[in-house]
Image: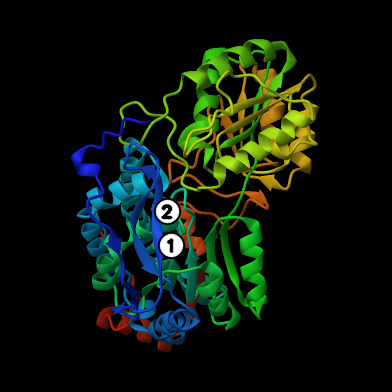
Amino acid sequence: MSDIKIPEEFQITSTIDQKQYLVNGELKEWKGDTTNVYSTISSTKEYKPTLLGSIPDLQEAEALEALDGALKAYDKGQGVWPTMHVKDRIECMEVFVSKMKTKRQEVVKLLMWEIGKSLPDSQKEFDRTVEYIEDTIEDYKQLDRDAAKFTKHDGVYAHIKRGPLGVVLCLGPYNYPLNETFALLIPAIIMGNTTIFKPAKHGVLLITPLLEAFQTSFPKGVVNVLFGRGRTVAAPIMQTGKVDVLALIGNSKSANALQDQHPKSNRLRLVLGLEAKNPAIILPDADLDLTINECLAGTLSFNGQRCTALNVVYVHEDIRADFNKNFAKKVDELKFGNPWEDGVKLTPLPEPDKAAYIQGLIDDALSKGAKIINKKGGQHFDNYIWPAVLYPVTKEMRVYQEEQFGPIIPIVPFSDIEEPLDDMAESNYGQQVSLFGKDVYALSPLIDTLVNLVCRVNLNSSCQRGPDVYPFTGRKDSAQATLSVHDALRSFSIRTFVAFKDNELNTDIIENLLEAKLSNFVSTDYIL
C-alpha cells in the first residue's frame, strides 16, 4: 500500500464543503458549525486519512424546521402531494430518476472514497438503485391499474386504493448508503407521503449531488434532507409525536431508542431493516468447490459489512477438515487494495475503529479455545485487518453472539443437524440462511423447518438481498415490514376506499365523477 497510484478520474482534487440543506423546497445556507468528512483511504505514500469535505452540523431548530416543512406539505392529507393523481406523482419520480442518472460519476466516486466500496460494486450500487426506482414506478402503475375498478358485495360498491400514511422519518445505513436508503425513501415518496431524510454518518457526501434533483423534481416539503448527528436531529423530531412512520435501516438499539422517543407509539408505523446473524449450514454431501466459493462471497463481499452476510458457518464433521483447509487457503488468496484497483476483493474499512473491534473479537475467541486457521488472519494494515477464519467457535464467544459486520469468519462444527436448528430457533434474529447439500431427502425437512425460522432459504447459494423484486424482510429482531419493489409500496401505505350503496342516486354521482375526471382518487383511468 506504500505506492499510491490513483487514476486521475478518481483523485480528490478539491473538497466538498456542503453548506446547504434541503427544507420545504429551499436549499438553505448553513452558517454554523460543520463536521469534517474523512476517508480511511490514503492519498499519500505515508498513510493518513483523506479529507473529503464537510457537512453542516445541524441542530434541533433545523430538525423541527424540516418537520414543519413535511407537515405543511402533507397538510393532514390535504396537501398537493398526497392528493395528487397517481400519474402525476409518477411523472415527478421519472423526472427525479432522469436527473439522478446525470450524477452517476460523482456518486460512484464518493461511494469508493467514503465507504471503501470497490469500483464495480459502487457502479453496481448506483445502477441497481436506478433500476429499483424504475421497477418501483412500474409496480406502482400496476398497483393503480389493479385498483381501477369497483367491487360489489351485499349491495355495497367499493373503490379500493392504497393511500399515504403521513410524515416519514427516513434513516439509512452506511454500507449501502444509496441503494438501501432509497429502498426506504423512494416508495415512501411515491405513495404520497412526505419525508425527512438524514443520510448515514459514512456515505453522507454522496447524497449532496442529488439535493438539487430532489428540490426540483417534487413539490416543496415532500423531501427534506438534514445533516448532522442522529440523536441531535432525529430525537427532537420523534419527540413531537408528529411522525407517522419511522423508516430505518440500522440496528435494533437505535430503532428502539427512537421509537421510545415517540409519545404515541401506538400511532407509529415501523419499517425497519435491522441486524442479522445469517448462518451457512454445510451438509456432508455438499459440493465443496461451490460451497467454498459461495461462502467466500457470503462472508466477505464488501468485507462482510452487509446485514445479509454469512456471520456463522456450521460445517458437518464429515466434511469439516476439507472445508476448513480449502476455505482458509481461498481467504488468503483474496486481493486487498484500494477500490479502483483491478480484481480487488477486500478494501479499506470505512469505520476507523472497526479493525480494533474485530481484533477484540479475535482475542476473545482465542482466549476461549478457538484458533486462526488461515495464515494471514488478523494481520493489520493502516486501515484494514485481514479476515480471520476462526475454528472451533463456541456459543460463549463474542464472535458467535454479535453481528460482527466486518472481516471475520466463525466456523462451528456439528454432527447432529438439530444443533444448528436449535441455535437458530434460540437466536434473536431470523433473516436468511444458506443451506448447502444435494440429498433431497435431507434437504426437504430442513427447508420446511427453515422457512419458519427465517424469511429466505438460499439453496447452495450465499445470502443476499437481490433481486430487489423479491421480498426482503426478517423475523424477530431482524426486521419489521418488508422492503422490496412490490412490498415496500404496501409498507408505506394503507388501504383506503370509497363505498356507496347500490342505488340510482349513487350510480349517477359516480358515473358523473368518472366522466368529469374531477377526483384524483375516484378514477378508473388505466395508466400505461
- Depth check: 205 or 159 in front? 205
Q: Position of residue 461 (x, y in %)?
A: 53, 27
The structure residue drawn at horizontal position 33% and vertical position 82%, both measured from the top left corner, is 80
Secondary structure of the residue carrying numbered label 2: loop
Q: Residue at (50%, 48%) from the top-left corner?
A: 351
Specify the quadrant that holds the N terminus.
Answer: top left
Q: Nearer the viewer, residue 259 or 149?
A: 259
**Whole-percent x and y of residue 108?**
29, 47
Depth check: 330 or 431 in front?
330
For the residues bearing labels 2 and 1, Cβ distance under 8 angstroms: yes
Q: Which residue is drawn at 47% across and 52% down?
A: 174
Viewer-proximal residue, 13 or 500? 13
Q: Name the residue under label 2.
A: 177
* 414 versus 92 height, above or below: above
Which of the marked residues, 2 or 1, is nearer the chain's N terminus? 2
Could you classify mark 1 by the number of other residues whose Cα lies within 10 Å: few (under 14), some (14-19), or many (20 or more)?
A: many
Q: From the viewer's perspective, is residue 528 above or below residue 232?
A: above
Task: Give the residue drawn at x 60%, y 80%.
Answer: 239
Residue 130 visible in the snapshot: yes
The circle on residue 199 is 1
